[in-house]
Amino acid sequence: MIKRLSPVAQEPLYELITQVLRRNILEGHLPQGLVLLEGPISKLMKTSRVPVQAALRQLNEESLIQRFRGRGYLVGSDGDALVPLRRNIEEFALDIPEPLDTALKVRGTWMHVYDRVESEVAACQIFGEFRVVETELAEYLGVSRTVARDVLSRLNERGLVRKGAQSPWLAGPLTARIIREKFQLRGIVEPAALKLAADHIDPYQIELIRKDIASGETLHWETLEGALMQHCLEKAPNGVLVEIIRNNRLLLSSVDRALNALGLPPDTVALTQYRTLFDLIGSRQTDAAAEYLKEHLRIIALKSLARLKIVALVPETETTPPYLSRVG
């Protein structure tokens, strides 16, 4: 029998995070001017960035934190003249009451199983449309239905599953149209973000990336994709645009990992293109870099579509987990 959750544990995750941060701001555990960033908070709270974003927006509306010209928020109201204090939030001894701590641990359990489920769901939809059965997922993982629902909600945020008001959770099918449209979106928003970010990109970080590429060591394409996102695109001073880019990339990244797991070789040409792209960014040829990025994405889209066609010749894996059932 699944233990009934406390009322606190059943509250929305963003509200739990809001309560923790609000309490520690008001009690002075988080000092005035401290820069609050989504990443470190999500790591501390063992959750995704989405509920952290909602919590920070709520605290901003309450005038407990304020926006500033850099990334994130500053602890303090809008009327305060504050000097940004850049320290990791984990350095501070936060006061988290036991009921809230327990609730966060319960709601954070999904993180321990999420990567496994993401990989399985991404891999299956290459072969068609599948129904994800929530009760069987919970049994398969050995967790409560609340945790299984949190996993599915995160998959939904990342575009790997979908659900209507009265419909079951569905994954796939991955089609050429979906791949094409997502790369078309990348070709529009990522070059635009690169141009916006130009004055905020740290040349030292770009030089380190260029040295890694020039060293001759084999770098995985995902490493360079992540570097482009972290050190370039995320520097764009438009949070909405950055979030669109991040979400649009997720399905493509997950599916590409699934294709590699099937034995399809990685694209070595893409690695060479990244060398040129980071050379252009490092030399501050922003317009040229944006145009090159657009062309790079067009080429990668064609190669991704070709890889998808190859999968049609690959027999479906016999190890599909029991919580996934083919539709039709």
Image (tube, rainbow, N blue to C red):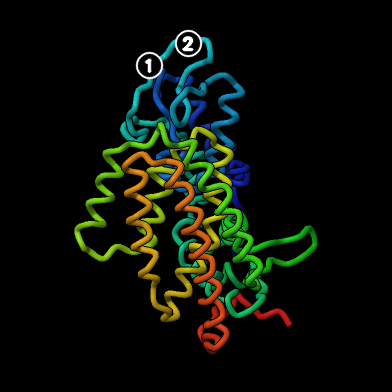
Which residue does the image show at 56% across and 47% down from the upper left? 189
Tell me: 102 left or right of 1: left
Q: Using the rendered view, name the quadrant where residue 175 is placed.
A: bottom right
Q: CA distance from mark 1 to mark 2?
A: 10 Å
Task: Name which residue type carries label 1.
Answer: Val
- Would you place residue 190 above or below residue 3 in this image? above
Q: Which quarter shows the C terminus?
A: bottom right
Tell me: 159 left or right of 256: right
Horizontal and vertical percent for residue 57?
58, 31
Tell me: 56 left or right of 164: left
Determine which residue is flagged by label 1: 83
Which residue does the image show at 35% across and 70% down from the upper left? 268
Determine which residue is flagged by label 2: 80
Q: Nearer the viewer, residue 129 or 274?
A: 274
Horizontal and vertical percent for residue 141?
51, 69
Q: Nearer the viewer, residue 135 or 189?
A: 189
Under circle 1, the secondary element is: loop
Task: Name which residue type carries label 2.
Answer: Asp
Q: Residues within 10 Å of mark 1 (few under 14, many from 20)?
A: few
Which residue does the image show at 40% across and 53% down from the upper left? 226
- Would you place residue 311 above or below residue 7 in this image? below
Under circle 2, the secondary element is: loop
Is any part of residue 275 visible from this angle? Answer: yes
Horizontal and vertical percent for residue 156?
62, 58
Residue 203 shows which numbered tag? none
Which residue does the image show at 54% across and 32% down from the upper left? 56
